[in-house]
Image (cartoon, grey):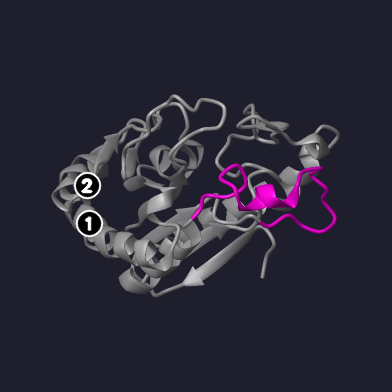
Amino acid sequence: MSEAFTLIDGGDVDILIIADHASAHVPPDIDLGIDRALLGDHIAIDIGVAEVSTLLAGQLGCTAIMGGVSRLVIDLNREEDAPGLLPVMSDGHAIPGNRDAILADRLTRFHHPYHHKITHVLEGMASPFIVSVHSFTPRLASDPAQDRPWDIGILYNEDDRAARIAIPLLEAAGLKVGDQLPYSGKQLNATMNRHAESNGIPYLGIEMRQDRVSDLAGQRRFAGILGPIILACRLAIA
């Protein structure tokens, strides 16, 4: 057991599902200074990601590693020197409890063990394929005019091998797909840059629109669509 991550052992297939923002947990000894209702909001958690990742691990027979704390505690999908690693503002909401927090303590307690676990699991795989699962809000409070109509986005930095396979398959399944949308993996891809791109490991970066996966029916639908597409990507690239 670790407070830094949750491990789902779905089987021995060499696919690793990584969900950086799957939890809204804030340890009781950390006071963020916010209304606790915000912990159910997208600023604290990628809604639907834990459920879809768990379904996929069982469906594919593979392992999933999910972040164990809210991104408001520390953002696991940021480099250790990146702005926003320890957020003091998020989508217009102040996070006053982070202003005096000691970054080194949070890195040691959460960020390092989370990424060390990912490295350890990948080292045990002969031919790994990574699936990064996130979700995005249909509308940002800080930019309500921004249109985010996609059902799902596919993100990548330099390695777009899986993206090129997955996008037409997702479109054929009836989804409106964003290629490097709602934002680009060239700007925000820290976990995949570290564990996939820097090691030559193929991966698929997925951003699901949260209102599509906010209930069990939507979660099952997306897991059912994504499972065969993930396998198709893995088989084509391996």
Residue 4 % position (x, y): 66, 57
Residue 36 % position (x, y): 73, 51
Residue 132 visible within the image = no
Disc marking residue 201: none
Mark 1 lies on residue:
229
Relative placement, left or right, of 148 versus 46 is left
Q: Amino acid at mark 2?
A: Ala
> 176 or 57: nearer the eye?
176
Q: Does dot 2 land on a helix, a strand or a loop?
A: helix
> 55 or 6: nearer the eye?
55
Q: Earlier in the sequence, mark 1 or mark 2?
A: 2
Quarter of the picture holding the C terminus: bottom left
Residue 193 % position (x, y): 45, 37
Q: Is residue 45 magenta?
A: yes
The span picked out in magenta is 25-47
Q: Amino acid at mark 1?
A: Ile
Badge 1: residue crowd in 10 Å (few <14, some 14–19, many ≥20): many
Residue 162 visible within the image = yes
> 173 or 129: nearer the eye?
173
Q: Is residue 165 magenta?
A: no
Report the residue that reaches farthest toward the front.
145
Mark 2 lies on residue:
166
Figure disc tally: 2
Q: Does dot 1 land on a helix, a strand or a loop?
A: helix
Report if the CB atoms under discs 1 and 2 are less than 8 Å apart: yes
